[in-house]
């Protein structure tokens, strides 16, 4: 019977994420907050009904890949190009300020007589590493919230997207530098070369795939379901290649695949199919899985104090750093607030970085609990703050409702559209000719 436990776990996750999503919606909060809370309630942190299994972990990984693939398809490429330089500046300052803030907090608390560390690395490297953890940004939380608010295709939304992707790259570089200091087998120059190689690879493959997809799509107007299969396979392959061959996060490969597909004529149709897949199955499991990873250890008074200070610093340094970067690039004050808030969430990225540090002796067990708290609080507070800062002053948005609740409405609109109507008409004609 244990072999079928995953069916019960999936049913429980899907029902609880939806119910809590509707509950949080009543309180004027994004539904993604409910999905995150569902994982906390069901997981080891509270009720302990569900534990994160290999199946849930792998499904959640596919969920975030599809989420970023959809974000790539729905990105306004022209606006993303315009915000490219600004995104780099925002990401750079948004990495430097949290790095300094995290190091400062760790420098004060990580010493004998305050909080004892059992990590094997030097105290200096441990303190720097805590700063590295705070530089992380979980773009998936902000992306889903912006989609739900219908603000992904805005100047602020594109800046958040671009900056978060660059933030991941800078985070990889920072993590590699600090681990290379602790582990001499890691070569920073090889890592940097692989990162550059990935973007060169993505550009070449993107051009070839786009040209091939364009010719194939033009010459084969029938059987539109095949486009979904090919697009999904391309997304998974780009994710795999980016992670395995180049050492770049798989979500970056998925986002690049989505950008490439966004140039084709089938984007609207593909987006509707992937939105249903994400809404009904993958996204709830991904967001719940974040809560399932949380296991809060017993903490002393100083560790609790360190946790509180670290959470405050984690929030303020991203808002100040990214907001300052946006201001330097000519964004208005309300847009700076939106961009700063959109970069707060650490999510699964910080957990991955923290686990890497713990494995190589750069993060003590006493400091893991506070890092988990940072992940929980920043992940939950980001959607709430995003809704608040996007309430006033309109941004240049492309009207669209691509939220969890709006996915089916969008699909129904698409069904009434001319593209799908033509397709259904052709299918009916083919069946009629076949019967003859």
Image: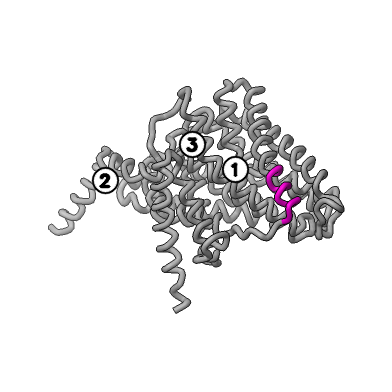
Label ID, residue 345:
1
Q: Residues within 10 Å of mark 2 (few under 14, many from 20)?
A: some
Element type at mark 1: loop
Which residue was labeled with disc 3? Answer: 75
In this view, 294 is above or below 76 = below
Element type at mark 3: loop
From the viewer's perspective, is 108 left or right of 147? Answer: right
Q: Nearer the viewer, residue 133 or 172?
A: 133
In this view, 19 is above or below 394 = below
User: Spatial distance from mark 3 to mark 2, Cα to Cα?
Assistant: 26 Å
Q: Residues within 10 Å of mark 3 (few under 14, many from 20)?
A: many
Q: Residue placed farthest to the left in the image?
A: 436
Q: Which of label 1 and label 2 is nearer to you?
A: 1
Which residue was labeled with disc 2? Answer: 423
State the residue at coordinates (41%, 54%). 229
Dividing the picture into quadrants, the one containing residue 292 is bottom right
Label ID, residue 92:
none
State the residue at coordinates (64%, 23%). 327
Q: Nearer the viewer, residue 33 or 67?
A: 33
Predominant SS of the magenta segment: helix
Quadrant the N terminus occupies: bottom left
State the residue at coordinates (79%, 40%). 104
């Amino acid at each position: 019977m244990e072999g079928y436990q995953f069916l019960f776990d999936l049913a429980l996750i899907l029902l609880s994420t939806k119910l809590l999503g509707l509950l949080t919606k009543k309180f004027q909060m994004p539904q993604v907050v409910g999905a995150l809370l569902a994982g906390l309630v069901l997981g080891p942190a509270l009720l302990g009904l569900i534990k994160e299994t290999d199946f849930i972990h792998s499904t959640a990984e596919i969920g975030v890949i599809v989420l970023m693939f959809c974000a790539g398809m729905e990105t306004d490429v022209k606006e993303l190009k315009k915000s490219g330089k600004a995104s780099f500046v925002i990401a750079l300052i948004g990495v430097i300020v949290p790095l300094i803030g995290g190091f400062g907090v760790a420098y004060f608390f990580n010493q004998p007589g305050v909080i004892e560390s059992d990590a094997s690395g030097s105290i200096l490297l441990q303190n720097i590493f805590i700063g590295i953890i705070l530089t992380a940004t979980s773009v998936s939380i902000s992306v889903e919230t912006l989609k739900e608010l219908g603000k992904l295709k805005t100047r602020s939304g594109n800046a958040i997207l671009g900056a978060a992707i660059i933030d991941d790259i800078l985070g990889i570089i920072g993590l590699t530098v600090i681990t290379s200091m602790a582990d001499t087998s890691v070569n920073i120059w090889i890592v940097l070369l692989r990162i550059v190689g990935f973007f060169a690879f993505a550009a070449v493959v993107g051009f070839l795939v786009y040209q091939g997809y364009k010719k194939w799509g033009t010459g084969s107007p029938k059987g539109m379901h095949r486009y979904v299969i090919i697009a999904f396979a391309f997304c998974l392959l780009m994710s795999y290649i980016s992670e395995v061959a180049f050492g770049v996060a798989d979500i970056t490969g998925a986002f690049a695949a989505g950008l490439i597909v966004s140039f084709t004529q089938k984007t609207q149709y593909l987006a509707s199919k992937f939105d249903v897949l994400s809404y009904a199955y993958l996204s709830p499991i991904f967001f719940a899985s974040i809560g399932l990873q949380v296991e809060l250890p017993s903490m002393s008074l100083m560790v609790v104090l360190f946790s509180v200070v670290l959470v405050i610093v984690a929030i303020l340094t991203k808002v100040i750093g990214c907001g300052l970067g946006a201001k330097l690039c000519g964004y208005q004050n309300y847009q700076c607030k939106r961009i700063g808030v959109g970069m707060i969430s650490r999510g699964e990225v910080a957990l991955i970085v923290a686990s890497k540090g713990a494995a190589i002796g750069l993060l003590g067990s006493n400091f893991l609990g506070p890092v988990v708290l940072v992940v929980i609080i920043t992940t939950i507070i980001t959607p709430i703050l995003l809704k608040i800062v996007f309430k006033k002053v309109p941004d240049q948005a492309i009207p669209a409702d691509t939220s969890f609740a709006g996915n089916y409405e969008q699909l129904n609109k698409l069904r009434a559209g001319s593209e799908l109507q033509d397709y259904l008409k052709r299918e009916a004609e083919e069946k009629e000719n076949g019967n003859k």
